[in-house]
Image (cartoon, helix red, strand yellow):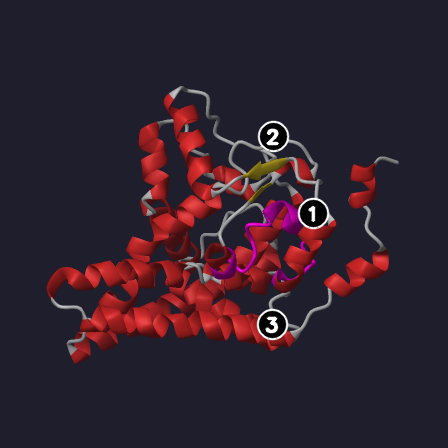
Amino acid sequence: MTDLQQRRSPDPGVLKALSERRNGPGIRRISAHLALLVPTGAAILAAPGAWWLLAAVAHGIVLMFLFAPLHESVHRTAFRSGWLNRLVGDLAGLVLVLPPRWFAAFHFAHHRFTQDPDRDPELASPKPTTLAGYAWIVSGVEYWHRTIRGLLRRAAGIAPDGFLDDRLRARAIAEARVYLAIYAALAAGSLALGSDLVLRLWVVPALLGQPFLRLYLLSEHWGCPTVKDYWANTRSTVSLAPVRWLAWNMPNHAEHHANPAIPFHALPAYAALMKGARVHEARGYAPFHAGRIADVAAGRAGPV
């Protein structure tokens, strides 16, 4: 057996310890993540004139990276307690317009069929092959159009997604209707009070922050081969500590796909244990996108 094969088969006792689900790390991380929204939100409210838009970018990045606890919560690894996973998933899903019960079904299908062009639901929206397509996706407009359209269709009882069985389809439809009712209540309340706080602290920051989340997510699989090996069809990215913190350690994405039962707080230790197993590693998000833009411009980038 080679050293690489040995690294891919760590001691079961070590894996069991790394896979232990705990409340403490998740409570500390989500508390700090939400606390970070206080100074960024205060900066929006305190900024004079149109300067609040600059603060809204920072606020929007923190808001949109609530995708990380949403992702961890649907895996039920953010916390040991199920109710905490559900609560955080619902709150983050509301911010992102990404209901967690539907997203869980979507995401688990993605894990089962990663980079399979026929069965991975992430590939239903192809990766960009032109500079205009790249700009369209990175802008976030494609995300909001696809996500809001899907939410409205499910609320109308239209849920054709192949990864939904009858039980999950009924749950996704009910969930979409609850989410729309909440959004309608927020809009009605804002109008009744003559308040623009929802726009200033959520809607506009979400629009400004979404491109940063798109840039982050594009690195995970774009350009990886259509093979079943999770170490080969998924990319990890070497990133700065603030990015790793904000993304709940998910830059270790190949490690996450190889063993999705490992909670976010144990992923760095698992990555160290499996050092050398990654097939695709980006040395930062800026170099990754510089390389992909060059590939797109040269016609070398495919839709997977």
* Identity of the residue drawn at 79% across and 44% down: 7
Mark drawn on residue 25: 3
Question: Circle 1 sits on which residue?
Answer: 258
Circle 3 packing at 10 Å, graded few (<14), some (14-19), many (20+), is some
Relative to 233, say whether 248 is above or below. below
Q: Is residue 250 magenta?
A: yes
Circle 1 packing at 10 Å, graded few (<14), some (14-19), many (20+), is some
In the image, which residues are magenta?
244-264
* Identity of the residue drawn at 73% across and 47% down: 274
Does residue 164 appear in the picture of this structure?
A: no
Q: Is residue 186 magenta?
A: no
Q: Position of residue 142 (x, y in %)?
A: 35, 43
Number of numbered tags placed on the structure image: 3
Question: Circle 2 sits on which residue?
Answer: 225
Amino acid type shown at disc 1: Ala
- List the single residue furthest toward the bottom: 193
In the image: residue 234, left or right of residue 203? right
Mark 3 vs mark 2, foreground winner is: 3
Q: State the residue in front, 177 or 102.
A: 102
